[in-house]
Amino acid sequence: MILGLYLSGTGNTKHCIEKLTNLLDKNAAVLPLEDRNVIDAVKESDTIIIGYPTQFSNAPVMVRDFIKNYDIWHNKKVLCVTTMGAFSGDGAGCTARLLKKKGAVILGGLQIKMPDSVCDVKLLKKSLEVNRKIILEADKKIERVADEIMHGKYPQEGVTFISHIAGLFGQRLWFYGKTAHYSDQLKISDACMGCGLCSSICPMNNIKIENGKAVAGGKCTMCYRCISRCPQMAITLLGKKVEEQCQFTKYA
Ligand SMILES: Cc1cc2nc3c(=O)[nH]c(=O)nc-3n(C[C@H](O)[C@H](O)[C@H](O)COP(=O)(O)O)c2cc1C
Ligand code: SF4
Ligand code: SF4
């Protein structure tokens, strides 16, 4: 039985995992990582497609912790899928190596270019048209990969030794010092009107409403979900101002 599993901030990874899993088995379950049935679902499945956004050429903390903290992976066959805005040396390999240590059998890795979810850094913004093209290419790739998997051939993107070196030296080592402390760096401006949306959608339960205002805690996994959905554009992380909120459904 196949299970699709994902963490998705702005909807890119959700789309990719739903599409790939459904092409392989239209009756397969697809769950977000924060679903409370997720552990039982992993236990009951033999093949798992796990997806997440690449963050600085690594897997998000929430995904890494989910793999490390539960002994549910022994003998599970896993395909690791990452989505990325531009480049990921071994985004898929980052979970593949952890899963292998937990006894999983790695079927392969897939790295899919999608719109960039960082909406508070101007340099990373692309036009609607460009993002639409990126999604069309991604969809074609997923369809091709699904067809190859049906014929027994799994993609091996990001899981080879060469890609490990590319991810480590190309990005991870450079970014590590900068990103290690982002879990408590979410900024919420005075524009917040206390609507509670951010608090209700955060996969880490990292935001509380206190005295009519949102207050962030110290366990942000940098998914950009709250930042891209806040009606007041009051939340930022890497940049100082939200340029234009990102959402997969805007481009599809
Ligand atoms: C904090 C952060 C760091 C990121 N780092 C990278 C990166 O190193 N390489 C890359 O290609 N994309 C990077 N991205 C872009 C996302 O991986 C990409 O947009 C992804 O498809 C978002 O998926 P989602 O909508 O499922 O959250 C980063 C995004 C965030 C929020
Ligand atoms: S979504 Fe925005 S406006 Fe609503 S509580 Fe959160 S920060 Fe405040
Ligand atoms: S605080 Fe916002 S960016 Fe951080 S994990 Fe929660 S929803 Fe994602």
Image (cartoon, helix red, strand yellow):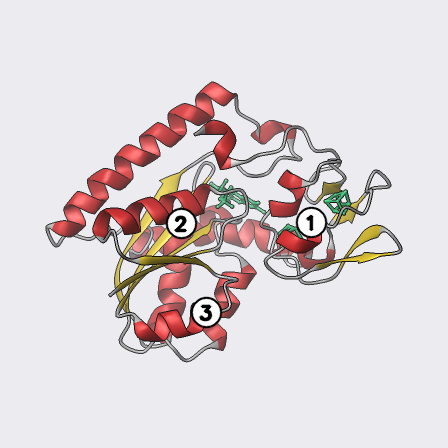
Asked if the beta carbon under badge 1 is closer than 8 A to the nearest atom of ligand 2, the reply is yes
Query: Which residue is nearer to you in this view: 172 or 31?
Result: 31
First in sequence: mark 3 vs mark 2: 3
| Residue 234 left/right relative to 18 | right
Asked if the beta carbon under badge 2 is closer than 8 A to the nearest atom of ligand 1, the reply is yes
Query: Residue drawn at (31%, 49%), measured in percent from left and top?
Result: 110
Query: Residue drawn at (51%, 68%), measured in percent from left and top?
Result: 36
First in sequence: mark 2 vs mark 1: 2
- Please, what is the three-letter code of the amino acid marked with disc 3? Asn
Q: The residue tagged with tag 3: helix, strand or loop?
A: loop
- Where is residue 181 shown, x and y percent of the image? 69, 58
**Label 2 CA crowd tier, 10 Å (few <14, some 14–19, many 20+):** many
Q: Which residue is mark 1?
A: 198
Q: The residue tagged with tag 1: helix, strand or loop?
A: helix
- Please, what is the three-letter code of the amino acid marked with disc 2? Thr
Q: Is residue 90 visible?
A: no
* Number of numbered callouts drawn: 3
Q: Is residue 16 above or below residue 5?
A: above
Marks 2 and 1 sit apart, C-alpha to C-alpha, by 24 Å
Q: Which residue is mark 3?
A: 37
Q: Which residue is mark 2?
A: 82
First in sequence: mark 1 vs mark 3: 3
Q: Quadrant of ligand 2?
A: top right
| Residue 74 left/right relative to 11 | left
Nearer mark to the viewer, of 2 and 1? 1
Which corner quadrant holds the N terminus?
A: bottom left
| Residue 146 left/right relative to 100 | left
- Please, what is the three-letter code of the amino acid marked with disc 1? Cys
- Where is residue 80 shown, x and y percent of the image? 34, 57
**Label 3 CA crowd tier, 10 Å (few <14, some 14–19, many 20+):** few
